[in-house]
Amino acid sequence: MADHETDEPSSRTGSPDGEGRVSGERLLLHQRLAVRELIDTELSYLHMLRLCASDIRSCLQQLPQGDLDVLFSNIDDVIKVNSRFLHDLQETASRKEEQVHLIGNLFLECHEELERVYKVYCASYDQALLLLDTYRREPELQREIQSIIEAVVPQAGPSGLSFLLVIPLQRITKYPLLLQKILENTVPDASAYPVLQRAVSALQDVNTNINEYKRRKEVASKYTKVEQLTLRERLARLNTHTLSKKTTRLSQLLKQEAGLVPRTEDKEFDDLEERFHWVSLCVTEMKNNVAVYLDNLEAFLRFRPQEYDLDIPGGPVVQHCSLMRDLQLQAFPHFKQRLKGLVWQPLCSLAKALAGPQNLIKKRLDKLLDFERVEEKLLEVGSVTYEEQEARHTYQALNSLLVAELPQLNQLATRWLGQILRTFMGLQRELAQQVLQRAEGSLAQLPHYHLSEPAFRKLVEDALGQTGHQLRSFQENFEKVLPPPTMQPLLPGAERQVQALLSRYGPEKLYQVTSGVSGAGTLDLTLPRGQIVALLQNKDTRGNSSRWLVDTGGHRGYVPAGKLELYRVIPRQEEVKEQEWPHKDSRHLTPEPTPAPVPSVPVVTQVVAVYPFVARSSHEVSLQAGQLVTVLEAQDKKGNPEWSLVEVNEQRGYVPSSFLARAASPAPWGWSVPS
C-alpha cells in the first residue's frame, strides 16, 4: 500500500521533482526496513544464544565439563557483548532522524570488542565439530542429545547441536551485509553515509581478521602438540624430504653464525620470549620445590614418636603424645589433601599449559630459517614455488600469533603462579592456626607459658648458651684425656719370635699387625692379626710409602703400612727382681725376661700390670704400671677373654687382659743357676 501511494503522485505530476521525492521516500522506507531487520534479527539471535547458554548447556550435564567448554567456548562473553550492543541499538529508535548515523557510530565503537570475542569462538568451532563427530559414533548418546535439542529448539531439526553452534559464525559474517543494505538505501549526500561506509569497512576487516586468526590457530595447532617419541619412532619419520629440509635449515643457521648472511631480528618477539621463558622457569622451580616439600611432608607423617613407649609417666610427655596423635590423625592429613588439590594440581596444570607454547616457540625458529631462505631467494630470483610460499606464510602466521598472544599468556601465567603462591602461604597460615588452637590447652600447662615472647626467646637463648658452654668444656676435657694404649694379643707361642726380633732389630723397629693381611702379589705377605714383625724399610722399590718391607723372623715381604702399629715392648724387670732377691756375692741370678702379654690371663694368684689404666666407669678399676694384681676371672660375664675381673687395693673391676702379664716366678730357695 505504501508503494502504491508513493507511485500515485508520480503518475499524477510526472515532474522530475515529484520523481525525486518519490525515490527519496522509497529509499527512506527501505532504509527503515533494513534497520528494523538489523534490530529484530539481533533480538532473535541473542534469544537463541541464551537458550544455548542456559537451557541446553544445563541439560547436557551428562557430558564432561571439558567437552562443554569446547562445545560452547566463550559463548557467555559473546552474550555479554551482544546484550550491550542490542541495548544500544534499541536506544537509537527514539531518535528517528539520527538513527542511521548512530547505528554507524555504534558499529565503529564496538567492532574491536566484537572481533575479540568472536575470533575466540570461531577458532574453537572446528574442535567442537570434531567432538560432535565422536558423539555420532555413540547412537545412544546422540539420541539423548538430539531429544534435548528438539525439546528446547524445535526448529533445529535433525542437525541438532551443530545447528546451534554455527549461529554465532553466521551472525558475525552477516553484520557487513546488513550494514551494506542500510548504506545502499542512504542518499550519498546524507551525513550518515560516510559513517556507514566506515562501519561497513570496519566489519569487513573484523571478518578478515577473524579468518586470519582462525588460520593461524590451525597452523599453530599442528606444532603445539608435545609428542613423546622413542628413537625408533623418530627414525621412522625420517625421509628424503625431511632430511633435505633439516639440512637446508642447518646450512642457513651456519651461514648466520659465520656472518655470511644477516639474522632477522625481532625486538618485540625477543622481549616476549624472554619474559615467557622466565615465567616457565619460575613455574618449573616452584613445581620442583613443592614436590620436595610433599616428599618431606610424607616422611614427617611417617615418623610418629608418640606411638613409642618413652617410659616417662605423666607430665608434659603425655600431653605432647596426645597432641601429636591428634595432629597426625586430623590436622596434617587435611593439610596434605588441600595442598595437593589447591597447589600441586594447579601447578601441574600450569606447567602442562605452558608446554604447547614452548614447543611453538621452538618451531618458530625452524620456520624463521625457512622464511629467511625464501626471502633471499625472492630477492635473487624474484619468484618462489608454491611450497616455499606456504612456508613463508606459515612463519608469518606463527610469528603473528605469538606476538599477539604471548603478552596475554605471560600475564595470565604470572597471575596464576602468584595465586598459587598466595594459596600455599594461606594453607601454611591456616595449619599454624589449627596447631596453635589444638595445642592451646597443652601450652597453658607449660612452666614458661606466662612469659612473653621476647622473655621466652631470651630464656631459650640463655639455656642453649649454657648448654653449649658445657658441651665445649666437656669436649676440651675429653681431648686432654689420652686413650689407653691398645695392643693386639700375641699369638700362642710367639714369645720366642718376639725376643729374636727384639734382640736383632731393637724395640723401635717392632710393629704389630692390627688386622689380617692377605697378600695379593708375589712379594706380599699373608699375616694374621696380632703378628709381630720388624720394619726393614718404610717404602717399596718404587718409592710407595704405603707398602713397607718387614721381617717376620722367617720371611720377608711387603705389607700395607696402614695395618701396622708400633709394638710397645714390655719393660724388663731386672732391677725389681734384684731388689726382691738379693745375693751376697756378685754372681747373682739374671732373672728370666718377662714374657710378652698373652691374649688371656691364666687364673693365677698374682699378675703384673704392664701399662697404666684409667677406669672409665664403675665396672672398671684403675691400674698403675708394675702394680701387682689379683685375677679373679680371666674373662668377662659374656666369656670375652679380652677383659679380666681383678682385685686391686681392695677394689674389684674389669681391666684389659692385654695390660696384664704373668709375674716372674723366682727360683726355688737355696738353688742357683750358673750365670
Image (tube, helix red, strand yellow):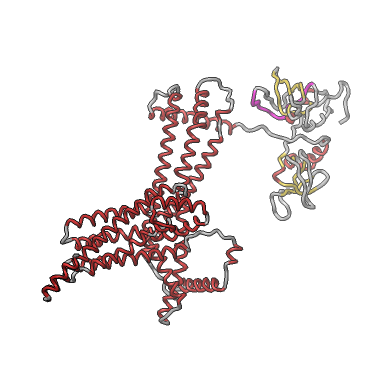
Residue lying at 18% horizontally and 70% vertically, measured from the top left = 187
Is 122 above or below relative to 367? above
Q: Which residues are magenta?
A: 605-617
Residue 606 within the magenta-colored segment of the rendering: yes
Viewer-proximal residue among 35 and 351 = 35
Residue 659 image offset from top left, x and y in percent: 73, 29
Residue 462 at x, y percent in the picture: 44, 29
How many numbered discs sit on the rendered protein?
0
Farthest residue toward the bottom? Answer: 381
Quadrant of the snapshot with the N terminus: bottom left
Say whether residue 541 is visible.
yes
Q: Give percent across and percent down for residue 439.
A: 45, 27
Image quadrant of residue 430?
top left
Q: Does the segment drawn in magenta span residue 456?
A: no
229 over 524 or under it: above or below: below
Q: Nearer the viewer, residue 226 or 86?
A: 86
Q: Nearer the viewer, residue 473 or 15?
A: 15
Q: Main secondary structure of the magenta part?
A: loop
Instruction: Pinpoint residue 139: horizontal percent, then vertical percent.
Output: 52, 54
